[in-house]
Amino acid sequence: MKKLFSIILLIILTSFKSYAIDENIPQTEEEWFKAYNSLPWEDGPLEFNYNEANSKINVPNDFSILKGEDAHQMLFWLNGISFDYVDMYALRSSDNSQYMFFYTDSGYVKTDDWTDLDPEQYIKEIRENYRIGNETRKENGQPTIVNVEWKKKPYLDGIYNSVYYALDVTWSDNTSTVEGRAIILGREGYTTGSYVGGQLGYDENMLLNLSKIHKFNATKEYKDWKAGDKVAAAGIGALLATTLGVKYLKPGLLAVAAVFLKKFWFIIFLPFIWLFKLFSGSSKKKKS
């Protein structure tokens, strides 16, 4: 019996794929090419069946994507910090713009607290919070964040049931990036799409496009909510605050806001200068 139990245990353990992040961040151009080409990139146009979110993402023809653990690996190499909640990472060949998507099963998010937002207070807290992430970046020998400003203040789009915002980030190596997000609401939760501008700078159409290429499946859209469905513990104001890594200031809602975002505690910042070094032209030829 003991031997049989050992055999069963061995079968169970070997049935799971073991995956560990390679924490050796590439330093030279040759190392970057080797690392990039070691990952299973898929080129658009393609339809990504986003099963976790009950949705689909129509990836344009000028993007290449990584999914799951492969996306986590690339993001660690780029940023020196683990983002193991990201489900899909996409890179645009023309200018190295980046998209990321992840889903949160929160329940239906109401929007009636939208007027309680305080963007100016939020930006002050963001500036305090990014210093925590800077310590990890220093340890990995990567650029640190010097300042953050609003590029686009939070905006609620009633047509696509999405919230957009963008932040202008200044880095210690005298570069700057703009990162935007679209919080795309569905019947059972929400998908967060993240956009980092590339060599051509910030393009608001790229930000707005996040909610257009992502579409919840039939009966799973925001408009499909029915009485009796699960409702999130707090509204869009608390959700926005937690995606920014700041406190929701309305009394009594700070505790319930925390249920939205246990996945991460600070906003993603990606210094695209690393991508400029990587994609000087020859890397794409090597991949193909």
Image (tube, rainbow, N blue to C red):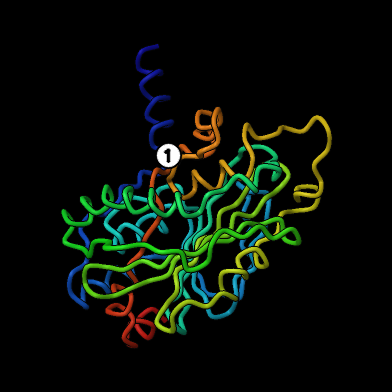
User: How many numbered marks are there?
Assistant: 1
Residue 270 at x, y percent in the picture: 36, 64
Locate the N terminus and report the quarter of the image it occupies: top left
235 to 66, vertically: above or below:
above
Residue 279, quarter of picture: bottom left
Residue 48, quarter of picture: bottom right
Q: Which residue is drawn at 70% across and 40% down?
A: 108
Residue 116 vs residue 26, the one in the foreground:
116
- Asked if residue 31 lies left or right of residue 179, the reply is left
Residue 215 at x, y percent in the picture: 70, 59
Residue 29 at x, y percent in the picture: 22, 78
* Structural crowding at the residue carrying mark 1, measured as other residues with C-alpha within 10 Å and reported as few (<14), some (14–19) or many (≥20): few
Locate the C terminus and report the quarter of the image it occupies: bottom left
- Asked if residue 251 lies left or right of residue 188, the reply is left
Residue 225, quarter of picture: top right
Q: State the residue position of label 1.
A: 16
211 to 114, vertically: above or below:
below
Residue 167 at x, y percent in the picture: 44, 64
Residue 134 vs residue 238, the one in the foreground:
238
